[in-house]
Image: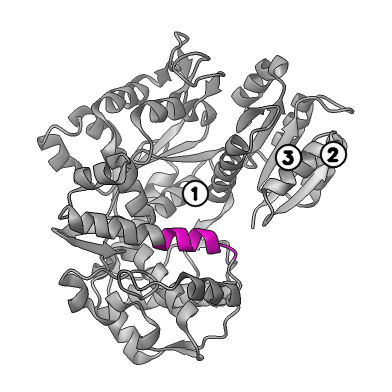
Amino acid sequence: MMQLLIIDDEPLICETIAMAFPGDQVISSLTAEDGIAAFLESPPDVVLCDIRLPDMSGMEAFEKLHRIDPKVPIILMTGRGTAGTAIEAMQRGAFEYILKPLDPDTLIPLVCDAAETSRMTRTPAMVPDPSADDQAVDASTDLLIGACPAMQEVYRSVGRVAGQNVTALILGESGTGKEVIARAIYQYSSRAAGRFLAINCAAIPEQLLESELFGHEKGAFTGAERKRVGKFELCNDGTLFLDEIGDMTPLMQTKILRVLQDQTFERVGGSETIHTNARIIAATNRDLEQAIESKDFRSDLFYRLNVYTIKLPPLRERGDDIALLANHFLNRFATELGKQINGFAKEAMDLFTQYRWPGNVRELQSAVKHALLEATGPVIVPAFLPDVIREPAAHESGRVSTSTGSTTNTFNFAEMTRQRLQAGSEDIHRDLVSIAEREIFAEVLRHTDGNLTQAAKRLGITRTTLRARLESLGMSVERSASVTEN
């Protein structure tokens, strides 16, 4: 649940915004002083602040809030006549600005993006104390769990590079935890007081990605109705995480190379040279050396990124870490779902340790949550596990299983909705939409024999969007006509 602070002297605007976020905690303040007091009492995840307030200007309020905690994203609300002030505030550290009258289609994704940025910036990524009780750890903490030699080397690498102001490259299969490692580097660095922003380079079309990274001037392209500050500018003195950088187009690779070389760029449609000292952490699941050979990735960009490389091992090579992670997720999700579970039966854990985990830690996390939703007793037994783990041979022969444990076209959405209502879930819509997307994508990919380009064409979306959705759903294409649930 997100905590949102609104500072605006118009009660109707506060009420309208609150209605757009019915499942979240929304605090409204009609003056800057009240807003600052609410901020001090309980730091929110996101702040929406009007530029014009009765007791002080929105810029003054922003500067005071930003000094208290610069990690909290602040979105400024402005009339068209004060957009210049909002842009100035962004250059000083504001997250974004939005024009009045407010458009829900713009407001909601913007606030959600800010909340995710807040989570990544403020949620610790840490190595747990082996002597501590795992259940006593704050549930909001992302733990780097693993005792195998490969993970111990990862922890040492984080320690070596975190304090150095150099570019870091994280390599690993999808689902191995590259984002958590990036946040650990950030949080152990001298820039931990600054901003951490992440962007998935595979999930955004080229023109929009260029605008996201570098910003744009008003009128730079169709739909550019206002000036925008990009991630490189927002991350000045902070850390920018470029996830899936191996999927960038050649043109974008050239632009990123220039920033790494000169620390300068121009906004799209602009001529002003802007300087940035953002620290870059990049990650990819691709073999970049192979991509260089096939002319899909620039060798000079690779050498710029490859100042210090951290390689994450796949889960199947981590031995006893599978049990450590499974028990950690069990404790974490049991608390979230309000379930009293004592642990895994030996037979269930044996299945976990024998399974190949093509989706790595992300797949394990999904499997544990599924088992908890299915559980009807105090112990997780094999019957509660997804079909793909209980019957891996049938899965590899071409049958598609999802995290619900059902096979294609056997979903009872009404029953699944009731199960999630009973479990107290607050993400029912997202869960069921994800299940439907899994079925659609799996069937289309089977039809196209796993060809992503053809599948994207039949789905009516871009190949980049399809890849991003498959990754977010924990799915991958391993072989012709075989879709794996990660």
Q: Who's the residue at 37% across and 63% down the image?
A: 362
Q: Nearer the viewer, residue 444 or 377?
A: 444
Q: In the image, is residue 80 part of the stretch drawn in magenta? A: no
Residue 418, numbered label: none
Q: In the image, is residue 428 part of the stretch drawn in magenta? A: yes
Instruction: Indicate whether 142 appears above or below 348.
Output: above
Viewed as shown, does residue 294 lie left or right of 178?
left
Position of residue 425 measured from the top left corner of the image (x, y, whole percent): 58, 69
Residue holding disc 1: 188
Residue holding disc 2: 11
Q: Secondary structure at mark 2?
A: helix
User: What secondary structure prevails in the magenta region?
Assistant: helix
Q: CA distance from mark 2 to mark 1?
A: 42 Å
> Do residues under tags 3 and 2 come within 8 Å of each other at their CB atoms?
no
Q: Is residue 18 visible?
A: yes
Instruction: Indicate whether 140 appears above or below 404.
Output: above
Quadrant in the rendering for residue 389:
bottom left
Dot 1 amino acid type: Tyr
Dot 2 amino acid type: Pro
Dot 3 amino acid type: Ile
- Structural crowding at the residue carrying mark 1, measured as other residues with C-alpha within 10 Å and reported as few (<14), some (14–19) or many (≥20): some
Instruction: Indicate whether 162 appears above or below 303.
Output: below
Position of residue 71 measured from the top left corner of the image (x, y, whole percent): 62, 42
Q: Who's the residue at 27% across and 44% down the image?
A: 456
Q: Which residues are magenta?
A: 426-435
